Image: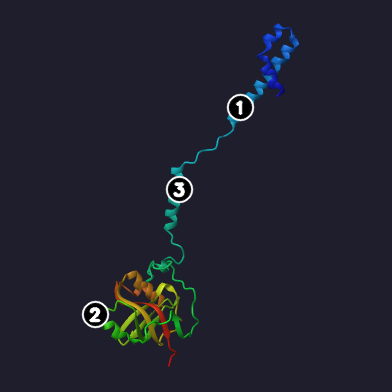
């Protein structure tokens, strides 16, 4: 402030000198003070100018780099992604073959929602109708196979007639040792063509060699809301 006041006074110097208010020494001090302020101010300006300026982000380059990283990561699927490639449940759930609860080996009884229909009919009889029933059915047969990884599907057989049973929305699972048990299943049925990837996936789930499976396959697929397993007789 003191130096600034001196510089401000410099503009009034001619009038004050004419009135005899300032001497030569005072004029010299005013000049030196103003020069000092100017020099310091200029020095600060030069110092600010000398500071490196932050580089602006190149949005295009950043986006390109991010895309390259994503592409690279996409080339190497996460562990377990290949296992789910042929999952019959597809994208009707969260994309993973996981259940909230897995029954202990040897478990019997009811799994899933309670049955709504009063009685079951043989699987072969229900699937013999043409067209297939459009609403829920309740069928009975013998468990021929179960997913050995997670119990998320089974094959129900009645003589030579078979249907693959999927648990609706992966809401429940079955014990992996249920093969040979009598079972009742309630749900909706359809005939579906399975892709080769799905056929291989199912073979692997069943503990078989997936490379031995080739081509597509047509199956009856029953999406179950409830399953009841009877003890082995």
Label 1 Cα crowd, 10 Å radius (few <14 / some 14-19 / many 20+) = few
Report which residue position mark 2 lands on.
130
Report which residue position mark 3 lands on.
65
Report which residue position mark 1 lands on.
45
* Residue at 45 percent of width and 56 percent of height: 73
Q: Secondary structure at mark 2?
A: loop
Task: Identify the image's colour scheme: rainbow, by chain, secondary structure or one colour.
Answer: rainbow
Among all residues in the image, which is located at the extreme left? 130
**Chain-order first, disc 3 or disc 1:** 1
**Chain-order first, disc 2 or disc 1:** 1
Q: Is any part of residue 58 visible from this angle?
A: yes
Camera-nearest residue between 148 and 162:
162
Camera-nearest residue between 38 and 138:
138
Tell me where residue 214 sits by quadrant: bottom left
Label 2 Cα crowd, 10 Å radius (few <14 / some 14-19 / many 20+) = few
**Chain-order first, disc 3 or disc 2:** 3
Q: Position of residue 31 (x, y in %)?
A: 69, 15
Q: Secondary structure at mark 3?
A: helix
Horizontal relation, residue 169 to residue 1: left or right: left
């Amino acid at each position: 402030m003191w130096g600034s006041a001196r510089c401000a006074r410099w503009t009034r110097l001619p009038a004050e000198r004419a009135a005899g208010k300032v001497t030569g020494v005072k004029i010299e001090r005013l000049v030196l003070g103003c020069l000092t302020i100017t020099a310091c101010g200029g020095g600060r300006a030069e110092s600010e100018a000398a500071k490196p300026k932050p580089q602006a982000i190149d949005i295009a380059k950043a986006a390109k780099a991010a895309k390259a990283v994503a592409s690279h990561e996409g080339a190497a699927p996460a562990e377990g992604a290949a296992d789910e490639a042929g999952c019959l449940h597809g994208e009707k759930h969260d994309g993973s073959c996981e259940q909230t609860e897995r029954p202990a080996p040897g478990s019997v009884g009811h799994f899933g929602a309670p049955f709504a229909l009063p009685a079951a009919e043989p699987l072969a009889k229900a699937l013999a109708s043409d067209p297939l029933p459009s609403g829920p059915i309740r069928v009975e047969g013998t468990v021929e196979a179960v997913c050995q990884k997670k119990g998320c599907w089974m094959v129900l057989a009645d003589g030579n007639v078979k249907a693959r049973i999927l648990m609706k929305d992966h809401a429940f699972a079955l014990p992996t040792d249920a093969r040979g048990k009598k079972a009742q299943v309630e749900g909706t049925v359809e005939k579906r063509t399975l892709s080769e990837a799905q056929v291989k996936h199912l073979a692997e789930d069943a503990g078989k060699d997936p490379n031995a499976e080739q081509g597509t396959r047509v199956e009856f697929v029953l999406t179950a809301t409830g399953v009841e397993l009877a003890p082995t007789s």
